[in-house]
């Protein structure tokens, strides 16, 4: 079935709610309205007000409520309308969702999924374009997952819903309706913590995720015209990171480019670069290169393209790492 | 009963006055003598266990600790009203609540001694881990109650917090959710007059905390928090109502924190000796003892028995806690996720190697 990312996510939730009656959805405008991006469309009609709950407008309340529901034994999927509003939930996510299993020595767990659209490129208002995934990767007890295609979206969301621990599920807004792809009708899981090599190559390794995967692909195509063959790793899960896949690839290619939309300083690229240096410094033929968002507030619509790494900037990065 | 006390008018439920005399005889809960003595015993146990913790802290045998002195009636009275399937979300000043629920005293001590196993809750005790970030347990209590309601599970959820918590956004969000969904929650606020040094008049311009419930569309009641029978009666009614689908209640237990905020605090910096003396005269345990004595439910022999039992339990708990070996290195890692990811396995191995090489 040809689906876009919104439809693939929607199908994953339909199927998981059918499979497991502990799965419930809560958030602002998720029920009657089907979510502001329509990701939860049709679920309220199918499963009713006892499974799909519109909430008052209160992000911390939503996540705190989801935690309590999870402690009771449900498996809530909470939607935060935009990543720019997730900061209000940090106390609940960091102090409780992430720590409860440890604090209670395993008696209580928090198998929730916090879904939120993220990233720039849709000409949105302030606070609607951020990519602050690294904030969550620093927190022990959280998993951070980012799909980059309809196929990945369905498989990763299914795995996240079934996961016994809290998952921050970041949906690249720009890719929601960017294209359709064949998505299997039956439920399937893409395992968390495993990256995927989405393009094989021998000259350098590009490490990317989310909305940067199409950018990496476009840059790789341009590079091939110049006789450079990049390998692209789609991380899929940012935490825990699939270090092994990254290191094995860089060992082969000897060069690494990290491409992310988030600001550069203390972005995940810094961690990946450090891992490469620790594990395989002597197979490097050039310094690791980062092509990233900027350490500035994401500009408003008229200027946001300066911020987002483009295929051209990625290509420049490829040339740099090849020359280095 | 609860609804006949209007928090907007400042009505306060009191059943026993400070001398232990019934002022509202018709509201005395119909508890058998055995339960009344049990409640008294739990209050004494709470007081003694609390004072013991303070002593241990001064001797360097316990870490920073939040004393419960003065809260025995609001903790024990409310928790004694819980049904067998009801669930509790406590905060960090809830010794009497834990004790009433049958939580092992050893674990309670262990927690404040800095041992993770202190919050290893036995499966038969329906209590949540204690919340340190103020007010953050309240949305969780609402989520638990909401889930129980969705599952048509007749469970009430009691949550505890101080007056300071009512200034937190999570208090508002939780009570608002509870009102909207009519969840089976009972919110018990110990208005003990201070959040560390900040007096309650700096937390809110409302005349009472109980009246805040009105804005959320449910009932709030102001209760004399040093009157254990009043606390029991208000809690019992609110819990039964919630379990029967009648929605949430906010109970403001008007009391006083006679100890320091924690052992790291010095309350003499911000309150007077006179004020403290005034509240010592309202002692919840003495008040209830006088009531029992007047009703021939207390004598010296009972007191001795209760004191001895409490002392034995406390001493055993301290001994067990102090004899508990520290957590293993593995223990620190294994509960981060259900399954350890490679990063944690690697860091665990590194730490073990380091300890081995450095001869520790």
Image: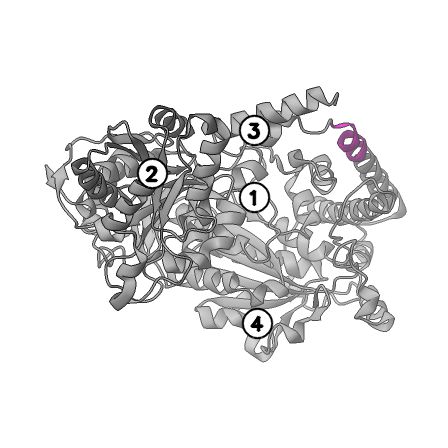
> Which one is in front in this view, the residue at disc 4 or the one at disc 2?
2
Asked whether A77 or B291 is in front, the reply is: A77
Q: Quadrant of the C terminus of chain A?
A: top left
Evaluate whether residue B341 shows in this view: no
What chain letter is assigned to the residue under label 2? A
- Residue on which the image places disc 4: B5
- For disc 3, the neighbor class at 10 Å (few under 14, some 14 to 19, many from 20) is few
Magenta-tinted stretch: B316-324
Q: Quadrant of residue A83?
A: bottom left
Q: Badges 1 and 3: C-beta atoms under 8 Å apart?
A: no
What chain letter is assigned to the residue under label 3? B
Q: Secondary structure at mark 1?
A: loop
Q: Badges 1 and 4: C-beta atoms under 8 Å apart?
A: no
| Mark identifier at residue B347 | 3
- Residue on which the image places disc 1: B128
Residue A258, given in percent of the width and then of the height, sits at 36, 41
- For disc 2, the neighbor class at 10 Å (few under 14, some 14 to 19, many from 20) is few
**Residue sitting at the far left:** A1
- Residue on which the image places disc 2: A323
Q: CA distance from mark 2 to mark 3?
A: 35 Å
Q: Earlier in the sequence, mark 1 or mark 3?
A: 1
> Which one is in front in this view, the residue at disc 2 or the one at disc 1?
2
- The number of numbered discs placed on residues in the rendered structure image is 4
What chain letter is assigned to the residue under label 1? B
Q: Badges 3 and 4: C-beta atoms under 8 Å apart?
A: no
Q: CA distance from mark 3 to mark 4?
A: 58 Å
Q: Earlier in the sequence, mark 3 or mark 4?
A: 4
Q: CA distance from mark 1 to mark 4?
A: 30 Å
């Amino acid at each position: 079935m040809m689906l876009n990312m919104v439809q693939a996510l929607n199908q994953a939730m339909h199927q998981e709610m059918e499979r497991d009656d502990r799965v419930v959805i809560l958030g602002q405008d998720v029920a009657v309205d089907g979510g502001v991006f329509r990701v939860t469309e049709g679920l309220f009609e199918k499963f009713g007000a006892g499974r799909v709950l519109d909430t008052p407008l209160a992000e911390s309340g939503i996540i705190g409520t989801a935690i309590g529901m999870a402690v009771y034994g449900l498996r809530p999927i909470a939607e935060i309308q935009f990543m720019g509003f997730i900061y209000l939930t940090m106390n609940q996510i960091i102090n409780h969702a992430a720590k409860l299993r440890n604090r209670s020595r395993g008696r209580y767990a928090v198998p929730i999924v916090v879904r939120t659209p993220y990233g720039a490129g849709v000409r949105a208002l302030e606070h609607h374009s951020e990519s602050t995934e690294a904030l969550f990767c620093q927190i022990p007890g959280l998993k951070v997952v980012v799909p980059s295609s309809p196929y990945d979206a369905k498989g990763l969301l299914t795995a996240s819903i079934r996961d016994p621990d809290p998952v921050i599920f970041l949906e690249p807004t720009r890719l929601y309706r960017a294209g359709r792809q064949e998505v299997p009708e039956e439920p399937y899981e893409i395992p968390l913590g495993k990256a995927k090599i989405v393009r094989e190559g021998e000259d350098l390794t590009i490490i990317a995720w989310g909305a940067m995967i199409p950018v990496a692909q476009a840059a790789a195509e341009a590079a091939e015209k110049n006789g450079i063959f990049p390998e692209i790793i789609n991380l899929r899960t940012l935490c825990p990171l699939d270090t092994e896949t990254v290191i094995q690839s860089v060992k082969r290619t000897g060069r690494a480019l990290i491409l992310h939309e988030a600001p550069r300083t203390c972005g995940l690229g810094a961690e990946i670069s450090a891992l490469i240096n620790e594990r395989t410094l002597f197979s490097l033929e050039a310094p690791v290169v980062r092509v990233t968002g900027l350490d500035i507030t994401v500009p408003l619509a008229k200027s946001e393209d300066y911020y987002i790494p483009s295929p051209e900037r990625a290509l420049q990065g490829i040339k740099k790492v090849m020359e280095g | 009963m609860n609804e006949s006390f209007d928090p907007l008018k400042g009505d306060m439920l009191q059943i026993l006055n400070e001398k232990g005399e019934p002022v509202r005889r018709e509201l005395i809960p119909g508890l058998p003598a055995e339960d009344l003595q049990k409640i008294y015993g739990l209050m004494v146990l709470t007081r003694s266990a609390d004072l013991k913790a303070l002593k241990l802290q001064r001797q360097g045998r316990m870490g920073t600790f939040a004393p419960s002195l003065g809260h025995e009636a609001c903790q024990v009275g409310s928790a004694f009203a819980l049904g067998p399937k009801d669930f509790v979300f406590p905060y960090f000043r809830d010794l009497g609540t834990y004790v009433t629920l049958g939580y092992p005293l050893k674990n309670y001590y262990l927690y404040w001694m800095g041992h993770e196993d202190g919050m290893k809750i036995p499966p038969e005790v329906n209590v949540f881990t204690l919340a340190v970030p103020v007010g953050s347990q309240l949305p969780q209590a609402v989520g638990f109650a909401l889930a129980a309601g969705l599952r048509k599970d007749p469970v009430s959820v009691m949550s505890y917090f101080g007056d300071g918590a009512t200034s937190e956004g999570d208090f508002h969000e939780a009570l608002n959710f509870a009102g909207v969904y009519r969840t089976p929650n009972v919110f018990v606020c110990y208005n003990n007059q201070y959040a560390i040094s900040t007096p309650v008049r700096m937390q809110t311009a409302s005349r009472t905390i109980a009246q805040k419930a009105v804005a959320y569309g449910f009932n709030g009641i102001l209760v004399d928090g040093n009157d254990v029978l009043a606390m029991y009666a208000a809690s019992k009614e609110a819990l039964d109502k919630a379990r029967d689908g009648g929605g949430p209640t906010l109970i403001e237990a008007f009391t006083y924190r006679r100890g320091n905020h924690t052992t790291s605090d010095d309350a003499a910096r911000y309150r007077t000796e006179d004020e403290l003396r005034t509240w010592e005269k309202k002692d919840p345990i003495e008040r209830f003892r006088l009531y029992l004595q007047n009703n021939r439910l207390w004598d010296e022999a009972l007191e001795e028995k209760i004191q001895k039992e409490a002392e034995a339990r406390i001493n055993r708990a301290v001994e067990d806690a102090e004899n508990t070996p520290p957590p293993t290195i593995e223990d620190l890692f294994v509960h981060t996720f259900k399954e350890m990811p490679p990063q944690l396995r690697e860091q665990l191995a590194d730490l073990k190697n380091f300890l081995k090489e450095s001869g520790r």
